[in-house]
Amino acid sequence: MNSSDDAKVAFAKRLNDTLTEMGYTQRGSAQRLKREAKFGISDRAINKWLKAETLPDHHNIEALAKFLGVNFNWLAAGQGEKTTKPNRDDLMQKIRAIERNNIDENTSNSNDPEGTLRVPVDYGMDGYVPVISWVAAGSFSDVMPVTIDDVIDWIPRPQHLSKRAFGLIIQGRSMWPEFKPDEIIYVEPEIAPWDLKDGDLVVIHCNDDKQATFKQLIMGDNPEDMYLKPLNPDWPDQKIVPMGECMLVGIVDSKVTRYR
C-alpha cells in the first residue's frame, strides 16, 4: 500500500467514524449524506470516499467538514483537534435545519395515490399525536412526513413531547413484562444519538427490515460500543445487535395502557 492509499484509508475511517457517531448506518450512508448535505455529485462518488477508493477534492472536503461540524484540517489530513465542541443550541439548530429540509423535499410525492396529501405528522391536531404503524415508523427516520393513511389512532400529547412525537402499538412479547401487547408507547423522534444513555428504550430501524423495532440500548465505554437487546429474558431471539447497524427513529418516553 503506497502513501496515496494510506491517505484514502485514513480519510475514509475519519469520515465513516464521524457518520456513525451522527447515527448514520453503514448501509445507505452515501444516499442519505448526499440528500442531507445537498452534494451535487452522485451517490457512487460519495461511496468511493466511504470505501477508501478516492479522496474528495478541497471544495468537497470543506463542504463535508462544515456539514459534519468538524475541523477541515482534521478531516482532510487528521491534523489538530477533530472539533471545537459546539454548544447544545448549535447542535439542535443543525438538527432542525436538516429536518426542515427533509420536510420541504418530501411534502409532495408524485407516486402517492390521487387525493393523498403528504403532510407533517402533527396534521394540525394540536394536543394530539398520531399512532402509526411499525412499517410507517421504519420510514419515519428518513422521511419526516407520512401519509394520512398511516394513522391508526390519535392519543393526547403530553406537553413535554414535541409535535413530531407519535405513538406505536406494542406487538409481541420481546419487551415483556414491562411492555405488553396492545399497550401504546409514546416515541419522541427529536433525540440526537449523542444524547442517548445506557438503558434507554429506543425505536430503531435496522438494515433492510421492513418495519421499525423496539429494543433497550446498552452502552460501553465509547460510541462504537452501543448494542440493542430485548427486555424479555425468555424471548427466544436474544441476539444483541450493534447500534451501528441501525438507524435511530426515536426514544420511548412513556406508555398508555388501555383496558377496553
Image: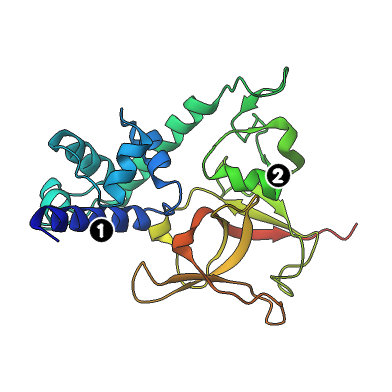
Q: Which mark is residue 87?
A: none
Tell which tag, 2 or 1, sits nearer the viewer.
Answer: 1
Residue 115 appears left or right of 251: right
Residue 215 x/y as whole percent:
60, 66
For label 1, the residue is 13
Residue 226 appears left or right of 174: left
State the scheme by which the image is colored. rainbow
Quarter occupied by residue 256:
bottom right
Give 43 or 109, whichever is nearer the viewer. 43
Quarter occupied by residue 61:
top left
Q: Earlier in the sequence, mark 2 or mark 1?
A: 1
Q: What residue do we see at 67% from left, 74% from top?
A: 237
Q: What residue type is labelled 1?
A: Lys
Q: Is the residue 65 above or below the residue 241 in the image? A: above
Q: What residue type is labelled 2?
A: Ile
For label 2, the residue is 132
Give 47 or 63, whichever is nearer the viewer. 47
Q: In which quarter of the image is the C terminus?
A: bottom right
Residue 39 x/y as whole percent:
31, 31
Asked whether residue 101 appears in the rendered view, the answer is yes
Give 181 or 21, whichever is nearer the viewer. 21
Q: What element carries label 1?
A: helix
Q: What residue do we see at 78% from left, 61% from top?
A: 257
Q: Is the residue 57 above or below the residue 211 in the image? A: above
Residue 28 appears left or right of 22: right
Residue 145 appears left or right of 178: left
Residue 72 x/y as whole percent:
14, 46
Q: Is the residue 189 above or below the residue 214 in the image? A: above
Give 238 or 92, whichever is nearer the viewer. 238
